[in-house]
Amino acid sequence: MKMASNGVCAGRGFWVVFLVLLRLGCSEGQRVPAAFVFGDSLVDVGNNNYLPVSFAKADFPHNGMDFPTKKPTGRFSNGKNTADFLAEKLGLPTSPPYLALISSSSKSNSSSSFLTGVSFASGGAGIFDGTDEKYQQSIPLTKQVEYYLAVHENLVQHMGSSGAKKHVAKSIFVVAIGSNDIFGYSGSSKLRKQHTPQQYVNLMASSLKDQLKRLHSYDARKFVFVGLPPIGCCPSQRNQNKTAACNEDTNSWSRMYNTALLTMLKGLQSELNNISYSCLDTYAVVQNFVQNPSAYGFAEVKAACCGLGNLNAKVACLPISQYCPNRQDHVFWDLYHPTEAAARMFIDKVFNGSTQYTYPMDVQQLAAVEV
């Protein structure tokens, strides 16, 4: 795929982009040149708004009620999400949705739009193709990587091969995906007959490895991996139990995948030997929120803030749904996703100084790695 350059690639326009890049590289507080984000609804900042038949959308109230604009943005949150807070810590603007940048109405689909990063994340997406069947349409990881290759081609056209390589190699690649694959396994008797849980998570890790090698071949060198949380404790899973307890099967599969992910990453680093990464123990952080909520300022860990029915988890966060008056004391915004408060606290825990929750280094250390 080739994207329109609006004439920036020639002559004087090239130097405009080059000077912009120099300014970006020297801006105060900016730790890396760019962040490229891959994942699902936990980090989607609006890509699904541009998928015409997708059911996995958040472009309506009450989503976004605490966002600075007070309007829904396509984030599955009452406000900012994990991608926003990570960008803030890195000294970057939030990476814009790729589909917004290349939409026919966009006037900014030149390389300058991509200099500080792009988000390819999509609600409903999984490591495997087809995890989006329930929601009709999302951008699976394989397609997200293809979109990145198009962005990389565009950067090369405008910055030259060497310039693009240096820019991208110093940037952060965020990967937050896998929950929908676990939900897919949980809800499919066919998959459970075909694969044991261990076989399935190993396939997840192996498939992810294939995509990481594609990214590496296009200059990606520094990765942040957001491990799976205890997804069995989200309101939609608790709602399936009469006691509102967590679903221990899905939690165990999440832990199993996180272990497989770490094993795969250690092997990949030995194989490629010029990549660096920070793997975030999302499971431990969120489990602490759930088991000791008052220590983190939370009061409600079972029910969603926005929804209807038992635990506000019978109906998703729709305009007809009720919402809690205090979003700060809820861990969950809707039946699947964290509140802005939980997302902020999560990034605070993993960005710097917390070896308890990161391996082999925290995100701040990763950003400082010389390439």
Image (spheres, rainbow, N blue to C red):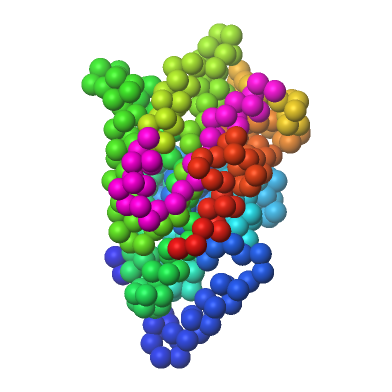
Residue under the image location 46 percent in, 48 percent down: 277
Left or right of residue 110, residue 330 in this image = right
The quarter of the rendered structure image containing the C terminus is bottom left
The image quadrant that residue 40 belongs to is top left
Quarter of the image for the N terminus: give it. bottom left
- Residue displayed at 58% across by 77% down: 23
Q: Is residue 319 above or below residue 212?
A: above
**Residue 346 is at least partly visible in this image:** yes
Numbered marks: total: 0
The answer to whether residue 100 is left or right of residue 310 is left
Q: Position of residue 66 (x, y in %)?
A: 70, 46
Question: Camera-side residue: 324 or 340?
Answer: 340
Comparing 255 with 11, the one in front is: 255
Residue 164 percent location from the top left of the image:
40, 71
> Residue extending furthest left?
194
x, y percent for residue 247: 50, 17
Residue 85 vs 239, above or below: the answer is below
Dominant secondary structure of the residues highlighted in magenta in the image? helix
From where the camera sits, is residue 107 visible? no
Whether the magenta-drawn stretch holds residue 270 is answered as yes
Q: Residue at x 59, y 52 (%)?
A: 364
Q: In the rendered view, tell whether residue 356 sits above or below residue 303.
A: below
The segment highlighted magenta reads 263-292
Residue occupying the far top of the picture: 242
Is residue 154 in the magenta section?
no
